Amino acid sequence: MVAIATSFSAAAAAVAVARRSSPAHLQLVARRRLPFCTAASSSSAPPAAAAGFGWADALRVASEFGVGDESDLSGYFRKVDICNRGMGDKGEFVEFMVEDQVVGYIHKGFTEHLRDFHDVFTIVSGNNGKNSVDHVTLHSSLRTPEDRTIAIGDVIKGLGELIPGIRNELYPVTSSYGMPVYFSLERAAAPYFGIKAYGVHMNGYIEKHGEKSLWIGKRSDEKQTYPGMLDHLVAGGLPYGISCKENIIKECGEEAGIPRSMSTNATSVGAVSYMDINGFGYKRDVLFCYDLRLPVDFVPNNEDGEVDSFRLIPVPHAANIIGRTDFFKSNCNLVIIDFLFRHGYINPDCNGYLKLLTSLRSGDCS
């Protein structure tokens, strides 16, 4: 993905330089480079190893499609559960508030790493004493989105390896979609502040002789997240300053070489959502879903190096891979299951139909 650059005023930039140059800040940066010993040490792990399967493995499983398998939804329920882990630990998080609006949730343990940045964060204690955190807010001196973005960006840098995988891509921080943006936050830090993150996922498919097939991508082994896993033809996070439609068109060009003359026909078909807690991370994601019917002779070509290869797979075979394996990137499963509902591959006669349909929006769809 291409990072989105945000311009700030010269005055705000000067403030940032002064803060980064202060002895206190330099001391904190040095301290944060030391190894951490926290309950969420797994969150600081190095990039995952590449997936241990190839297309031959995926296609073999895909073709093992027996009569009656389409009515067994158990594999789909398991994929929904994978995206909605840790809800029993929700009580370990406190509200992150800006201008009296809840914009995220921060783990109580993670707040301890924010205490040193008292010119950026205000940690409000509860009625049980100073060791009980009620909520976190921003320092009153940070009044504009630009000032907040710069100040919190400095904190992210200061936290060092506690937040791995910095992408230099900004996500808008808001109470809900379409509401005012209070500041922008480094994408890799989004789960640590529990902000709502939005993305666009597109099912690219063809229809031939009355049968539908999906174009499926296999992520590059060099990707920092989910290397080598199966993925949508086109998908990406929704950065600051771009609409969903323009983002899907941009991603179509970068990830699959789909010309604008085709990608403008991508149709918005709804959204899925999930909430996932893992260590200090709290993901609250909403994925806007798109469908694009492609010409039967179209062949995708990756332009940004993030995809290793593509395969055209009959929809029932793709469904079989989802139900029987963990080959797909976890949130892609939800979007393809949604596709299966909308195109009639999952029908009301399947046991658990309504429960599964509802579970695709287990998160806060706002």
Image: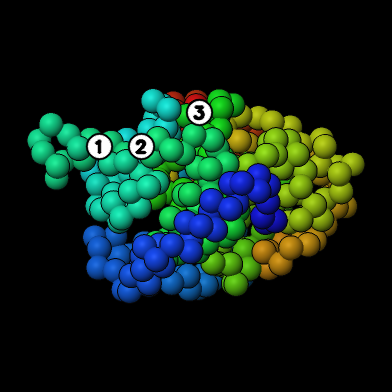
Badge 1 element: strand
**Is 283 in front, or is 135?**
135
Q: Quadrant of residue 102?
A: top left
Colouring: rainbow
N-terminal of the two: label 1 or label 2?
Answer: 1
Badge 2 element: strand
Asked if disc 3 and disc 2 are in contact, CB closer than 8 Å, the reply is no
N-terminal of the two: label 3 or label 1?
Answer: 1
Query: Does residue 93 appear left or right of residue 26 in this picture?
Result: left
Query: What amino acid type is highlighted by mark number 3?
Result: Ser
Q: Which x, y percent locates residue 251?
A: 73, 49
Cα–Cα span, label 3 and label 2: 17 Å
Query: What amino acid type is highlighted by mark number 2?
Result: Thr
Q: Which x, y percent locates residue 310?
A: 71, 61
Q: Which residue is mark 1?
A: 124
Cα–Cα span, label 1 and label 2: 8 Å
The reply to whether residue 340 is visible in this rendering is: no
The reply to whether residue 22 is visible in this rendering is: yes
Q: Quadrant of the N terminus?
A: bottom right
Q: Which residue is mark 3?
A: 176
Q: Quadrant of residue 223?
A: bottom right
Relative to 119, does residue 167 appear above or below in the rendering? below
Asked if disc 1 and disc 2 are in contact, CB closer than 8 Å, the reply is yes
Query: What amino acid type is highlighted by mark number 1?
Result: Val
Q: Which residue is mark 2?
A: 137
Q: Residue at x 75, y 39 (%)?
A: 246
Cα–Cα span, label 3 and label 1: 23 Å
* Crowdedness near tag 3: few (<14), some (14–19) or many (≥20) residues, C-alpha within 10 Å: some
Q: Residue at x 60, y 72 (%)?
A: 222
* Crowdedness near tag 2: few (<14), some (14–19) or many (≥20) residues, C-alpha within 10 Å: some
